[in-house]
Amino acid sequence: MKLSKLQQLFNGSVNPEEFKAEIGEEVFQYRKKMATKGTSIAININEDSSLYFGRDNLIKLCCFQIDHIFTSTEISYIADCLTLSDSVHYENEEAKEILEEIIELETMGKLDTERMLSIIERIE
């Protein structure tokens, strides 16, 4: 996944369906690896630009899942890419911690609409 494409997703200049198609194979491999306990998961992130990630982007990410635009696995993959990139700059430490929480919730099979709504309530 290219950070520049992710930035375009957050600023609305790329369609979510187009973005999903672009990361589809990566998410498929991610999902397979998540199903196997004890397996390391390769994350394919192209740091072709820097990305500022803050409250607004976090709310958008949660809403993508709440509105069924992205699956919980796709959201977790995006969160994993963000947290592993050296080119992502956070508004505050809480934004990164919430991304890590999203990844953990998906790993436990507990990333759902209710959890995403509670995240939004916490940061608003």
Image (cartoon, rainbow, N blue to C red):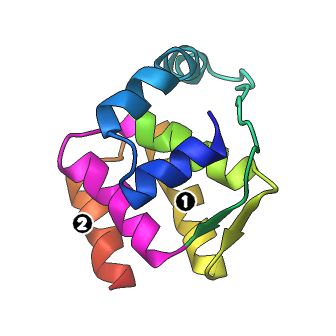
Q: Which amino acid type corresponds to the residue marked 1 in the rendered image?
A: Leu
Pointer 1 or 2: first along the chain: 1
Q: Is residue 64 left or right of residue 80?
A: left
Residue 13 place in picture, x, y as percent: 39, 50
Label 1, on which residue?
99
Q: Name the mark on residue 26.
A: none
Secondary structure of the residue carrying tag 2 is helix
Residue 91 place in picture, x, y as percent: 61, 80
Q: Which amino acid type corresponds to the residue marked 2 in the rendered image?
A: Leu
Vertical comparison of 88 with 85: above or below: below
Q: What range of the chain is rendered magenta?
A: 54-72
Give the total number of marks visible in the rendering. Answer: 2
Residues at marks 1 and 2 touching, judged by CB atoms closer than 8 Å? no
Who's the residue at 71% across and 29% down the image?
44
Q: Tell me the quadrant of the picture where the C terminus can be found.
A: bottom left
Q: Name the mark on residue 117.
A: 2
Using the numbered discs, state the Cα–Cα distance from disc 1 to disc 2 in whole angstroms. Answer: 14 Å
Query: Visible in this render: residue 86?
Result: yes
Vertical comparison of 25 with 34: above or below: above
Query: Visible in this render: residue 108?
Result: no
